[in-house]
Image: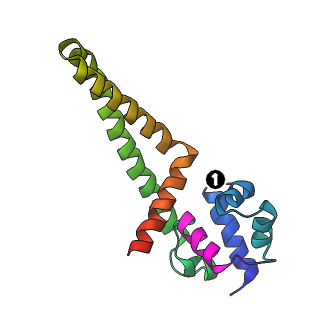
Amino acid sequence: MDQKKTGARIGALRREKGLTQEQLAERLGVSRRTVSRWETGSNLPDLDLLLELADLFSVELRMLLTGEGETARQLADYAGEEKQRLRRRMNRLFLVGVATACLSLPLAAVTPALGDFAQGALLGILLVGALMTSRWGERIRAAKRRLLRRGA
């Protein structure tokens, strides 16, 4: 295993993900300087951080360390599919929100309690949508993947 090549892969994957060294450091709980040392090949992350990096970049640990495994094209395809899945989920959430908003006014006129429920549901849908499309959404999805991996 070549530390410099591993560091270069970490840097390339970080840039593909659209993260700065500081953002990556914040996600992993390390300093920006530590990330810089990894990328220059001066140091390598500990095993637990390597596993987190592999999860964050959606690559196998072997690919992260040696470059073997998935090709860059496969990684790009996977990232594109993941974005499409998320976009479809958000579109469904938006449609449910619009339908709830359209139903809340007539329901409020007929039965105030149902109207209040529909407005509460709409607020919940909007909050979940805002949360999942913010920078916290990726953190939530990463935590979910870690929990599911531990349960397996």
Specify whether residue 79 is in view.
Answer: no
Magenta stretch: dominant secondary structure? helix
**In the image, 64: left or right of 7?**
left
Q: Secondary structure at mark 1?
A: loop
Pick the residue in front: 106 or 67.
106
Q: Residue 138: x percent and y percent?
A: 53, 53
**Picture quarter containing residue 6?**
bottom right
Q: According to the image, label 1 marks what residue? A: 18
Where does the magenta region start and end?
A: 42-56
Specify whether residue 135 is in view.
Answer: yes
Residue occupying image coordinates x 22% and y 12%? 109
Q: Residue 101: x percent and y percent?
A: 31, 23
Q: Residue 149: x percent and y percent?
A: 43, 72
**In the image, 135: left or right of 44?**
left
Please, is residue 145 above or below residue 6 in the view? Answer: above
**In the image, 48: left or right of 130?**
right
Please, is residue 81 above or below residue 127 in the view? Answer: below
Pick the residue in front: 125 or 16.
125
**Picture quarter containing residue 5?**
bottom right
Judge whether residue 49 is colored magenta: yes
Please, is residue 94 above or below residue 25 in the view? Answer: above
Pick the residue in front: 36 or 101.
101
Identity of the residue furthest to the bottom in this view: 1
Q: Residue 104: x percent and y percent?
A: 27, 21
Identity of the residue furthest to the left in this view: 110
Q: Quadrant of the C terminus?
A: bottom left
Q: How many marks?
A: 1
Q: Quadrant of the N terminus?
A: bottom right
Q: Amino acid at mark 1?
A: Gly
